[in-house]
Amino acid sequence: MNIKDIFKNKNTMSTDNKDKEILENEMNLNTEAAATDETVLGNENEGVEEDALSTEQKLELELSNEKDKFLRLFAEFENYKKRTSKERMDLFKTANQEVLQAMLPVLDDFDRALIEIGKSQDDALLQGVSLIHEKFKSTLVSKGLEEVEVRAGDAFNADYAEAITQIPAASDALKGKIVDVLEKGYKLGDKIIRFPKVVIGN
């Protein structure tokens, strides 16, 4: 083999080595590019998942707010129904107040008439007036009228009776107590529409 052939073989080997290095470099570049692509793709997927999670949390928060608004509105409506129902019942109870108050003096006249007729010996008259009195009184009671229970000997309570005057008590036991009831008191439901007028001992 001459020198020319040796240089030729050397150049051929050198060229093969260069081609091999180029090929290896290209493979390394392709591997790095693929790894970079996978990293970018992974980051994009994480971003999408985070966006989806954030959207889900927002929707849950909005749903929770709407539920809270609904519950508040429902509670307010229930309170409104109870309040209007109570007001309506109170209105029904007190709707006849003025008419009943106007009838009370007539009822007082019947009570006084019965006392005076009872002093006479006319039983037929007493019975007739008593029947009319009871019918009239039962009609008023059916409309919600009730008598305030106050009797002589009861302790005086300014919340349920009106003191007209004071007189010396016949005994120490009657001091500060009701001695006589001058006028009956009446109430409509829980509301007193006329306080009993009483005399108390001192």
Image (cartoon, rainbow, N blue to C red):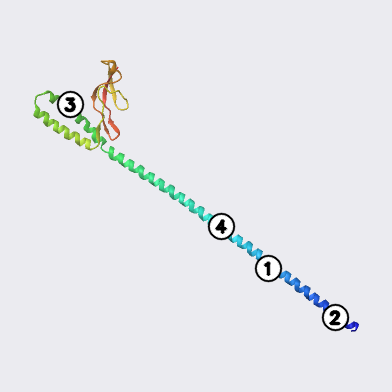
Looking at the image, is mark 2 or mark 1 earlier in the sequence? 2
Q: Which residue is mark 2?
A: 9
x and y percent of residue 6 in the render? 88, 81
Residue at 29% over, 31% down? 192
Q: Secondary structure at mark 2?
A: helix
Q: Secondary structure at mark 1?
A: helix
Q: Nearer the viewer, mark 3 or mark 1?
A: 1
Q: Which mark is residue 34?
A: 1
How far apart are labels 3 and 1 at the CA level?
Answer: 116 Å
The quadrant in which the N terminus is found is bottom right
Number of residues whose C-alpha sits closer than 10 Å to that of mark 2, classed few (under 14), some (14–19) or many (20 or more): few
Looking at the image, is mark 3 or mark 1 earlier in the sequence? 1
Instruction: Name the residue nearer the viewer: 153 or 19.
Output: 19
Q: Which residue is mark 3?
A: 112
Looking at the image, is mark 2 or mark 4 earlier in the sequence? 2
Number of residues whose C-alpha sits closer than 10 Å to that of mark 1, classed few (under 14), some (14–19) or many (20 or more): few
Is the residue under label 4 in contact with that under label 2 (CB below 8 Å)?
Answer: no
Q: Where on the picture, by quarter, is residue 137?
A: top left
The three-letter amino acid code for the residue at tag 4 is Leu
Q: Nearer the viewer, mark 3 or mark 4?
A: 4
The three-letter amino acid code for the residue at tag 2 is Asn
Number of residues whose C-alpha sits closer than 10 Å to that of mark 3, classed few (under 14), some (14–19) or many (20 or more): few
How far apart are labels 2 and 3 at the CA level?
Answer: 153 Å
Q: Secondary structure at mark 3?
A: helix
Q: Which mark is residue 53?
A: 4
Looking at the image, is mark 4 or mark 1 earlier in the sequence? 1
Looking at the image, is mark 3 or mark 4 earlier in the sequence? 4
Is the residue under label 4 in contact with that under label 3 (CB below 8 Å)?
Answer: no
Number of residues whose C-alpha sits closer than 10 Å to that of mark 4, classed few (under 14), some (14–19) or many (20 or more): few
